[in-house]
Image (cartoon, rainbow, N blue to C red):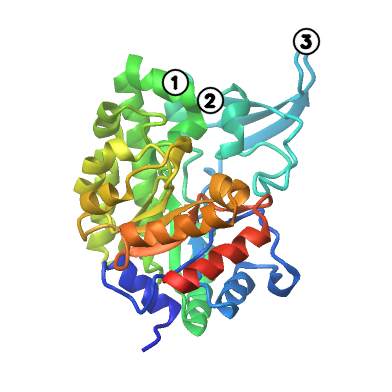
Amino acid sequence: MSLSSRDRMLAVLRYQEPDYVPLLFNTFGFTPPAHLRWSNQVERAQSWLSIGVDAWLTATVPMQTFHPDVTTRQWQEHTPGERWPCMVQEYHTPAGLLRQEVYRTDDWDSPDWPSHGSGVSLLDDYNVPRYRRCPIETEADLEKVKYLLYPRDDAIARFREETAALARQASELGVLLVGYGLSGGDAAVWLCGVQGALVMAIDRPALFDELMRIIQEWDKRNAAILLDTPVEFILRRGYYEGTSFWSPALYRRFLMPRVKEITDIVHQGDRLMGYTMSVGYMPLLDALAEIGYDAHYLLDPIPNGARVDLHRVKSAFDKKTAVIGGLNAPITLERGGREAIRREVFDTVAALGPGGLALSPAEAIYASTPWESMEILLEAWKEVR
């Protein structure tokens, strides 16, 4: 009996064996061929479903809503001796001024990164390697940032209405509705930069713990907002939480308890919980399994260029934590030939399937992902699924 995409994905998330191993795509700047063109996420889901691929719709809690008393000012500086102009954003809060400075590098406007906009935003991956000055540098900055991690009632009301409409569309399409808006350590990196966050955690642990407490309270509020909507699966970011950034000891001290708390809140709300971490997960497998979330999202089989033992991942997660991922986009799909793509599909299904697995390229398919590689992937998936 053929399942709907929603029921197939729910079977995976509950670690049951579906009618076949699903395949779904996270797209980021990807331009589909003419017969699959879309202009919004509903059309995108329809396009994937039309060729037999699974899909879901997503609802994201408004992230960059500030206290009503916050005002902002932005301009661009050209400093002699510096290669690029610098975009400066000031946030005037009731507790004082926060300042953010980001170099506008030559690749600021790029099809590979379509979502960051033309100016500076407070919470943006694109800022992180381009910082001249991070918003949070001192203890005094913590009181100020509370006014920038502030859920506005008007934005939340609109979000609930939009999510209710999305839920109806998801039901009509027979796909899962997924909730986003939990950021954890990723928010710390957005606010402090990678080096700033790590140095703070090591040299000023009490200060970093307080920052993470503020972010956790924000995440818990966002989780409560999501739980008050029809979303069925809630995803927490952890792109910057693996051991490419943090030692296992720092992860267990600052990050793991907070992921566990959010997981428990989501489960108490009778929803399924996912955690996104594509690289740096292998040294944390025992800790990740201990947390008890339902699905590990965008697990890369070649993190940092070295292939991992997926059988070990399967064993560690021990029929409790499903995997959505298992394929690599930048190396296998973009640079690998036909045999490399086919081998990865077959090897991943053999190691991680059939129950508790949905195939997905990590972290996404991009503007640079060739459609020819996608066709090879689709062919191999249909053979082995």
Give the image location of residue 318, x and y in percent: 20, 56
Give the image location of residue 160, x and y in percent: 48, 67
Q: For the residues carrying marks 3 and 1, which lies nearer the camera in this image? A: 3
Q: Please say if 120 is above or below 179.
A: above
**Disc 2 secondary structure class:** strand
- Report the residue marked by disc 1: 140
Which numbered disc, 3 or 1, marks the residue that appears first in the sequence? 3
Disc 1 marks a residue whose amino acid type is Ala
Q: CA distance from mark 2 to mark 1?
A: 9 Å
Viewport quadrant of the C terminus:
bottom left
Q: Please say if 65 is above or below 251.
A: below
Q: Which residue lies most toward the bottom here? A: 1
Residue drawn 80% across and 19% down? 78
Q: As rendered, which of 319 and 204 lies closer to the eye?
A: 319
Residue drawn 55% across and 68% down? 378
- Report the residue marked by disc 3: 81
Residue 265 falls in image quadrant: bottom left
Give the image location of residue 82, x and y in percent: 75, 15
Residue 31 falls in image quadrant: bottom right
Q: As rendered, which of 244 and 62 lies closer to the eye?
A: 244
Numbered badge on residue 96: 2
